[in-house]
Image: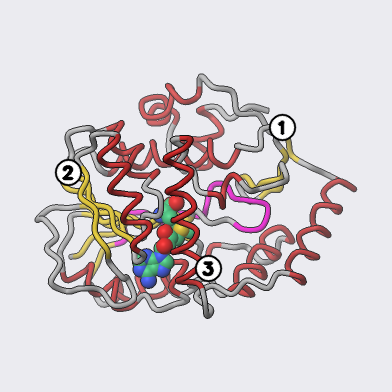
């Protein structure tokens, strides 16, 4: 099977016209997959369960800051040599099994997930950021999301931040080399600097960054709310979206909880909505995922 506008409109919960408008240029490059069944599916599920048992990584455990600091230093060296910005956590996937619309799939293309990330962000950047002039990403890592955003909107003002200096150095280099309209600065989401000025009518964006705070998200969400942005978009893991009656989702939920990814984002935003402080514009289950988890749940909200 091939990823086309019909598949994307189903998994992004939208219509084909919108997909054709926003993603058709990317669909020219073939992205094929097939569903796995029977013994092959059992084998993959056993592999996932074994990996859950042996995995030792704890999100926000001791030494994680150093890991990010070292990881982004390595990425900086790699970028100088090869111009590649796709983080290792995508390219190091050794297998070709992924998740699509809650099902396990396989693809001959080991970059299937990278391709899906690009289709997805092209869709939501174009749908939600068209009329916004200033866009801030927190926990930006290598800045690959901002690079794609600047290809779509070269004239918008972009702001990229991360909590480790090696990432900020990389972001600055990328901005300079690619002649982007992007300012870069250090910012710790666990202890947000309340004096940071956010331009009126801005967008605030996180992608796989709140997941790293092991639930310490309240100060960042309250900071975001206090800055009265026009729109906030999170693309993050959130266990509430899994249907744990299905084995594939059950394993992803299990893995995510074992690692200790942030699990309270949706609950906190729902609470803020019940207190009439925010409006949740759209929320949807991750349309796709890696072998182990679905990390791309989409939540868009704005202050009331
Ligand atoms: C999984 S990476 C995602 C990076 C990027 N947003 C992306 O989509 O590729 C998580 C990012 O969160 C950053 N991070 C972790 N803890 C943070 C904190 N307390 N404040 C700000 N950034 C943080 C890491 O340095 C890393 O860049």
Q: Are marks 2 and 1 in contact (CB under 8 Å)?
A: no
Question: In the rendered structure, which disc, 2 or 1, sits on the residue that comes first in sequence?
Answer: 1
Residue found farthest to the top: 28
The mark found on residue 240 in the picture is: 3
The mark found on residue 157 in the picture is: 2
Q: Are marks 3 and 2 in contact (CB under 8 Å)?
A: no
Residue 247 on image: x %, y %: 74, 61
Colour scheme: secondary structure
Q: Is residue 25 magenta?
A: no
Q: CA distance from mark 3 to mark 1?
A: 31 Å
Quadrant of image for the N terminus: top right
Front tag of 3 and 2:
2
The residues colored magenta run 280-293
Front tag of 3 and 1:
1
Write the residue at 36% across / 47% down: 143
Picture mark count: 3
Quadrant of res 277? bottom left
Asked if the residue at label 1 sits under 8 Å from ligand 1, the reply is no
Is 221 drawn above or below residue 25 in the view shown? Answer: below
Residue 155 on image: x %, y %: 17, 34
The mark found on residue 108 in the picture is: 1
């Amino acid at each position: 099977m091939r990823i086309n506008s019909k598949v994307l409109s189903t998994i992004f919960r939208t219509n084909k016209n919108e997909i054709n408008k926003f993603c058709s240029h990317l669909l020219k490059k073939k992205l094929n997959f097939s569903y796995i069944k029977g013994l092959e599916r059992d084998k993959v599920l056993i592999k996932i369960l074994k990996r859950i048992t042996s995995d030792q990584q704890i999100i926000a455990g001791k030494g994680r800051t150093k890991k990010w600091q070292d990881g982004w230093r390595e990425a900086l060296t790699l970028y100088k040599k090869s111009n590649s910005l796709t983080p290792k956590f995508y390219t190091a996937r050794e297998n070709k099994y992924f998740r699509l619309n809650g099902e396990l799939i396989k693809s001959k293309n080991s970059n299937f997930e990278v391709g899906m990330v690009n289709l997805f962000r092209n869709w939501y950047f174009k749908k939600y950021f068209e009329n916004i002039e200033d866009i801030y990403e927190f926990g930006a890592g290598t800045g690959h999301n901002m690079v794609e955003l600047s290809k779509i909107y070269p004239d918008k003002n972009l702001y990229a931040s991360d909590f480790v200096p090696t990432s900020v150095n990389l972001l600055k280099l990328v901005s300079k080399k690619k002649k982007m309209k992007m300012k870069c600065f250090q910012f710790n989401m666990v202890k947000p600097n309340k004096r940071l000025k956010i331009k009126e009518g801005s967008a605030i964006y996180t992608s796989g960054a709140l997941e790293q705070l092991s639930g310490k998200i309240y100060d960042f969400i309250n900071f975001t709310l206090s800055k009265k942005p026009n729109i906030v978009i999170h693309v993050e893991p959130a266990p509430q979206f899994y249907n744990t009656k299905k084995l594939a989702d059950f394993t992803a939920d299990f893995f995510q909880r074992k690692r200790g990814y942030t699990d309270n984002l949706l609950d906190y935003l729902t609470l803020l909505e019940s207190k009439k402080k925010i409006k949740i514009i759209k929320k949807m289950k991750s349309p796709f995922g890696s072998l182990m988890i679905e990390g791309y749940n989409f939540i868009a909200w704005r202050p009331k």
